[in-house]
Image (cartoon, helix red, strand yellow):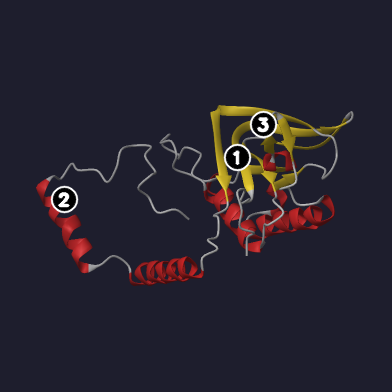
Amino acid sequence: MRVSGAHNTTMKAVVQRVTQASVTVGEEQISSIGRGLCVLLGISVEDTQKDADYIVRKILNLRMFEDENGRAWSKSVMDREFEVLCVSQFTLQCILKGNKPDFHSAMPAELAQPFYNHILETMRSAYKPELIKDGLFGASMQVHIQNDGPVTIELSSPTAPSDPKQLAKQEKQQQRKEKTRSKGPSESGREKTAYRSRQDPNASSGADGDVSSEREP
């Protein structure tokens, strides 16, 4: 359960599409990737495994790449079998007090390191382990990012409501969604689709590159 208050913190990730990225500590390059995603990950003091699962699922399923026909926003990093470079970055949990950054919302290092390592293992289990790279936790790193586009997407894990009634409402909504998905499209939905097709055979389900109406993973 999250702590209620003015600053209800969540796990945060900055996901960048890159042509290449690398991490250097001192004079030594410890990891590098070619085309794929560079992810800066900020873990909050209130994060749980549920937050981690959400962020991992989004990172791996975000449609940030083109398909084989060049259509943008069609394929995920897993679809294209590209690499992912993850870098732990507690500064994403910054709360400004005037002009001074405050990092008390970040998970303490002694807890964050095993939690971060578990996130990496979750990602490797869901994808190909050899394609998941990372920096050096707690070190002063130089992160070299060649952003492709540029394309940058910010992610935050959902904020859990503290009101029990709201929690119950969300649970019921999720159960209805799962039942709907398991049953597939309704008869009325199929009939409407067929009717639109008869009315306008050239009708499209959406503009090229528009993913806002598509179901999220």
Q: Which residue is mark 1?
A: 15
Q: Which label belongs to residue 197?
A: 2
Q: Which label belongs to residue 50?
A: none
Q: Residue at x 19, y 43 (%)?
A: 203
Q: Secondary structure under badge 3?
A: strand
Residue 89 in view here? no
Q: Which residue is mark 3?
A: 20
Q: Nearer the viewer, residue 27 or 8?
A: 8
Task: Residue type at mark 2: give it.
Answer: Ser
Q: Residue at x 54, y 38 (%)?
A: 153
Left or right relative to 4: residue 211: left
Q: Seen from this angle, which residue lies furthest left? A: 199
Left or right relative to 94: residue 214: left
N-terminal label among 2 and 3:
3
Closest to the camera, between mark 1 and mark 2, is 1
Task: Residue type at mark 3: give it.
Answer: Gln
Task: Residue type at mark 1: give it.
Answer: Val
State the separation of the CA atoms marked 1 and 3. 13 Å
